[in-house]
Amino acid sequence: MSNNKLLKGLAVALMGASTMANATEGMWQPHQLPQIAQTLTEAGLTLDPSQMQNFEQFPMNAIVSLGGCSASFVSPKGLVVTNHHCVYGSVAYNSTEENNYIRDGFVASSLAQELPARPGALIYVTEEITNVTDAVTGSISADLSGKDYYEQVEKNKKALISACETSKDYRCTVTSFHSGLEYNLIKYLAIRDVRIAYAPPLSIGKFGGDTDNWQWPRHTGDWGFYRAYVGKDGKPADYSEDNVPYTPASFLKVNAKSVNEGDFVMALGYPGSTKRYRTAFDAENMFTWTYPTAKRYREEMIAVIENETEEGSDERIKYQSRIASLANYAKNYGSLLESYNAGTVQERKDALEQDLAKWINSSADRQAEYGGVLEEVRRLQEASEATRERDLLLGYIGQTNLWRLSKRLYKYAHEQLKPDAERASGYQERDVDRLKRGLSSIERTYVASVDKAIMLHFLEQYAALPESQRVSEYDQIFGLNDGFDKDKVMSILDAMHAGTDLHDKDVLLSWLSKSVEEFRNSEDPYIQFAVASYGFSEAQESQSEELNGQLRKIMPKYMQALIAYKSSQNEAIYADANSTLRITFGNVMGYSPKDGLYATPFTTLEGMMAKYVPGDSEFDLNKATLNAIAKKEYGRYFNNTINSVPVNLLADLDTTGGNSGSAILNGDGELVGLLFDGVYESVIADWDYDQNLNRSIVVTSSFMLWAMENIDNAHHLVEEMTVVE
Amino acid sequence: MSNNKLLKGLAVALMGASTMANATEGMWQPHQLPQIAQTLTEAGLTLDPSQMQNFEQFPMNAIVSLGGCSASFVSPKGLVVTNHHCVYGSVAYNSTEENNYIRDGFVASSLAQELPARPGALIYVTEEITNVTDAVTGSISADLSGKDYYEQVEKNKKALISACETSKDYRCTVTSFHSGLEYNLIKYLAIRDVRIAYAPPLSIGKFGGDTDNWQWPRHTGDWGFYRAYVGKDGKPADYSEDNVPYTPASFLKVNAKSVNEGDFVMALGYPGSTKRYRTAFDAENMFTWTYPTAKRYREEMIAVIENETEEGSDERIKYQSRIASLANYAKNYGSLLESYNAGTVQERKDALEQDLAKWINSSADRQAEYGGVLEEVRRLQEASEATRERDLLLGYIGQTNLWRLSKRLYKYAHEQLKPDAERASGYQERDVDRLKRGLSSIERTYVASVDKAIMLHFLEQYAALPESQRVSEYDQIFGLNDGFDKDKVMSILDAMHAGTDLHDKDVLLSWLSKSVEEFRNSEDPYIQFAVASYGFSEAQESQSEELNGQLRKIMPKYMQALIAYKSSQNEAIYADANSTLRITFGNVMGYSPKDGLYATPFTTLEGMMAKYVPGDSEFDLNKATLNAIAKKEYGRYFNNTINSVPVNLLADLDTTGGNSGSAILNGDGELVGLLFDGVYESVIADWDYDQNLNRSIVVTSSFMLWAMENIDNAHHLVEEMTVVE
């Protein structure tokens, strides 16, 4: 079976249908817009939908990626608007004790004052999209082993990328759609002289802090402005004073009034990743085992860290952001589990697969085409879960500093033996700087007692695993063959930490230039541990590639069957998010987060003021903000339906991580806000979109423009943009 | 100036006006209804308002008090409905490990199975209301000292009550309206054979527990049924098997449909106490000093207790309910402060008093009548706050077990020297049982280390007070004359606790029969402390009576001025709540607790199910409830505007503590629900009613009847009532 045949089926399926269970579900590729043109026009799009199917035309060509965030051009002089949290790293990079741009914000009053973004910051403009499915998988024999198939796909992708990246002006990706049913080669113009034009103070840009993260009501001014610079020849260039602002193919006009309740809106951006088509088995495994277990592990790890470090101590401060991150994901998993348990995603997935199986079995042709596919996918997924307990536990043990780094160093020594192109990703020349930064941070993160306590905690759980999941190297090193003896394991850990020098930054870095032989001869206990368990790690990786390769062979067929079935049910299909340009549409609307409560679609400046807590790390406001709100000079930004300036708004847009900074447009294609978050009940959206509960949170263009004029003294940028009403 | 003159002014004021800043503000006495008749009719009352001005006529004569709770007759056979939390003590009294009525609920399937309520339970039916202002204050010379005036008022009240309480079939009160401007003698028929007919399981009656207390969304089935029994002659009688159900003068019909959003509702009940006419000075003192300080003291006390007792230990368990109570009031004060700081109550009080002063000063007649009154009230209130720091601190020190009890015992010995009628309230014959119960509980509450730690904690703050607020007896006993020496004070406390026997119940009780002389000769350190500080305590009490007496002389005049002024502004006046029968009206409506959120006016059975947490102490549901909700057999209780059975609802009724169990009637006078709580933003309502934020929480008649039929098997009671649709 060739992939061409698969693609023909796909094209039919994708063209045929436009109904969805949820009218506003879907992250559409531009070329799919003809399919949903009527729906869009009925929903309120006044632009010609056919105009939007071309990523080289307005408004799509104003939309750019920052790699992980979305953004858009808003002036002919390369001005780019995105979220505050997307420019945060660049603000921090330029911030000092005297010039605390993080706290106070930063406004360049002229081009000359604009500051270089953090090293590595790029603005990606989509230039070409080519279907390369044949080149990636068309010539690979299905008879290959999983591992060989996996490696051949990687090799083909690398060759395509290498041919595409003709200079450092371009970055290219080969991206899978529908689990490998289609591959696209995407070529981006990569603008590398990026500068900060304006960022609001933290008290606006991150108002509400972690407390308000994923929450509504919300009052965050999550915007920030970059400017793209190029050489005088108009081409990307390294930073130079002689560079000039980039002239984008088009830019967005900004609407001073933003929108009203019920209005049509669309988000244009680069959503990162979703799991909408995962199997019922996969979902059940994740929600009944992985998420609850990982949530528990994270909470246990926090408890261990807090137990080992005194509140306010230097040791605790080293772990502050780690604790916040552990807690953040524990909260994220908590939301996933609440939504899963309260909702019907599992039932619907179960029913869908039963229906799909019935549909396949009810036709001889379909049996011939898809017979056994569902069973094969199930078998592979079961196989990949056989050692899930062990794998997750070793994953958490592997988060301790010295263990994580010594493993990486030894792997690095092995990869050095290969030509650069063949090295594992993360161990190539291009990765060395990042690797060094990681090693150098050891002194800011290492607390021996915490590393030991985390290891001890999770080793105890590891030691309780059945024989089939045990790793003889671990058992031997920690003396676990006769069961778990806490004192004994602790004395081994004590000895390891007493005997190692790896907590010294220079020692760590010196290992980057050592040979495999030198590792083998080392007496450092952690290096010895890495050497002893290397065989297991490599075997684990091989096994994973073997399984992944087998899945890569079967999943396109699975998705083809699923798409054909959905098409027979008249359901439109969009691909899972994969960091490529997408369009999603919906309306400004509130929702009921729980019985007896309704989240109204707008918040106001007065509501922001009501949250103000003087001196608080999350809810403080500076004097300029307090004065501006008190004065109530709202001018053209006043919205009489809410009797204030709208601050944030809710819309039933289908978005996910990576959409941060996405332009929110009204039906006329004018910028009315920036997407920056979703509500708590939307965390499950990576798996399942529910129009009743899924709400994106948007900071309005009105709040942004009003603050630029009334708080941050950024009038010149407002004037540079084309503001309409 | 005679009180008759005052009263004439009052009558004019009360009749003249009917506009209020908040249309639904006001806890009206029945006789005031003619004033607001038009407003009521326009709001949706279809009953003739004049019918409601008479407390002896339907529907007012169906409304009874339980002393602290409100209730109403709902059948001709003495069936009384109120809140679950109002019958809780009686359910607990009958509950055993085998018959766990608290957990499982209690349904008497026939009259014979009904169980006696807790000892002392009474149903109060209002029989007579007489204006006795002249008898209370008319003959007292204004020249008396404050203390003498105070005592004369008390004496006159006692005489009126004594004459009124002709047998134990009656209970009488003399109640002040408008700060002593009017006194009413109220005579209640006191039905003393009270039995429990039905209480739902705790998982319905207290669903949501302390977590949901004061919160919306709410899903609590806070109802319970008593039955009033009397002798065969129809008169109140002690419990006897021969007693018969009481035949009330009238009873309420119950509406199966409850109400819809926007519908007119009124609450009929006995609200306990409000502070709506407190002065600006008083408000400022309470909100800027007393509440914040008391909140802090409570939080500190919790911290001290938790520090001294290990989680899960017997000691901690002894303090569990104390901690809950401290936290509950700290939360309550927190809400008061949030509302005060976010709102304008102080500004409005300040403005009102400025306007009042201007109004008085702008007329020679008014100057002659009220000149100096405002200043005198201010002077007295300032005087009473002179030692506020000391008084509050000693109050918290006085909450420790042995100190509280030894002071009470020594006071008791002194009061024994007087004839019973002259003894201080709380120390008369009628109080001895309660006193003994208090002493007997020592073994369930005493933890020496906690008593010592609390004393130490607050003595340190006491020792930092200026000389003018210090008490020489305390300074001497705890060696504080040369400053606070923690070790020294602790060793004194150690010695006191080592040397006392008062933690022994029998020893404590034995002191009830000891003479003042025996106290004086005792070597028990706590008894010595009580003896040494008795003079100070008595002086403090005298001083308080002197100030209160002076306030009793001036406050009626202050209120007269305020009423006359408000009348001149066309504002209607209602008296502060004082546990007498009141009517308040409003509408079923949601509210916005904060920017971006709207509390919808109804919750549903599905919402209750969504809160269900198996095995949780607050959010568990029993099988019968789960099955009944799953079956969705909602019959006549289904409300199609919310697509479910309404569980709880919100209304802008003006209510307070004591209103618990109040009948909520529709415009036709049918029971549509029972009031049981207010939302968090309503806690400040004792001081200030804001129609935007003040919401009472009501359990609907629909939920109650549906649960009686579908969960609790109480069909016979539904049949006994008159259910209409």
Image: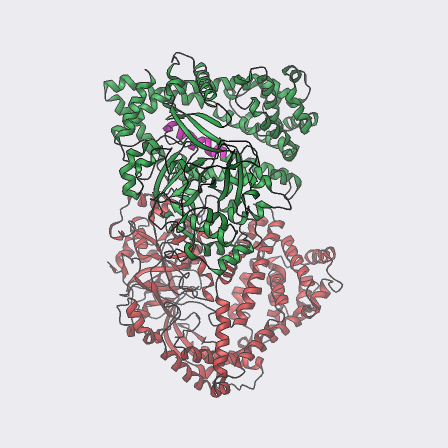
Chain colours: A green, B red
Numbered range of the magenta stretch: A279-294
**For residue B416, above or below residue B664:** below
**For residue B22, above or below residue A235:** below
**For residue A184, above or below residue B138:** above
Q: Nearer the viewer, residue A60 or B440?
A: A60
Q: Is residue A651 magenta?
A: no
Q: Residue furthest right?
A: B482
**Which residue occupies 48% across, 53% down?**
A608
Q: Position of residue A368 (x, y in %)?
A: 27, 16
Locate the N terminus of chain A by quadrant: top left
Residue B171 image-quadrant placement: bottom left
Q: Position of residue B709 (x, y in %)?
A: 29, 51
**Which residue occupies 32% across, 51% down?**
B707
Q: Is residue B3 left or right of residue A569?
A: right
**For residue A358, above or below residue B188:** above
Q: Main secondary structure of the magenta part?
A: helix
Q: Residue furthest front?
A: A233
Q: Position of residue B167 (x, y in %)?
A: 41, 75
Q: Is residue A98 left or right of residue A542?
A: right
Q: Nearer the viewer, residue A6 or A335?
A: A6
Q: Is residue A287 magenta?
A: yes
Q: Is residue A193 visible?
A: yes
